[in-house]
Amino acid sequence: MTKVRIPQPLQVITSDEEIVHVSAKNVRQVIDELELKYPGMKVALLDNDKLKPDVAIMLDGKIIQLGLLEPVSEDNELIFIPAISGG
């Protein structure tokens, strides 16, 4: 299963779970599986079925470019990175 690290701002959706595991073949399926387990995750990550512009995805330590179509395997670690604002 793909290991997904949930950032602090999204842990409210996962009841404070930092690491979850899902069975998926690409990032879109990861998000779909997260939504089944943790309703509200899809709204937090997607806007009109596209990744929100202020969310980046890191796969095994590298920012991905294919977005929702990026393939994943059971050996991967995926991290959603929401933008941090401040001033």
Image (cartoon, helix red, strand yellow):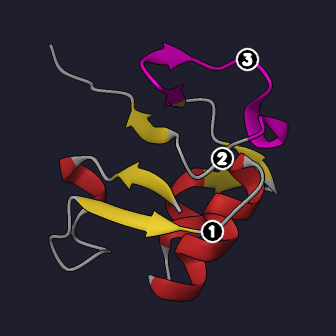
Q: Amino acid at mark 3?
A: Gln
Task: Characterize the local packing of mark 2: few (<14), some (14-19) or many (20 or more) Cα atoms within 10 angstroms.
Answer: some
Q: What number is the disc on residue 23?
A: 1
Residue on which disc 3 sits: 65
Front residue of 67 and 87? 67
Provide the secondary structure element on which disc 2 rests. loop
Q: Earlier in the sequence, mark 2 or mark 1?
A: 1
x, y percentage for residue 37?
48, 86
Q: Is residue 50 found inside the magenta-colored segment of the image? A: no
What's the CA distance linking mark 2 and mark 3? 16 Å
Provide the secondary structure element on which disc 3 rests. loop
Q: Residue at x 27, y 46 (%)?
A: 7
What's the CA distance linking mark 1 and mark 3? 21 Å
Q: Amino acid at mark 2?
A: Ser
Q: Amino acid at mark 1?
A: Ser
Q: Which residues are magenta?
A: 57-71
Q: Earlier in the sequence, mark 2 or mark 3?
A: 3
Residue on which disc 2 sits: 73
Quarter of the C terminus within the rendering: top left
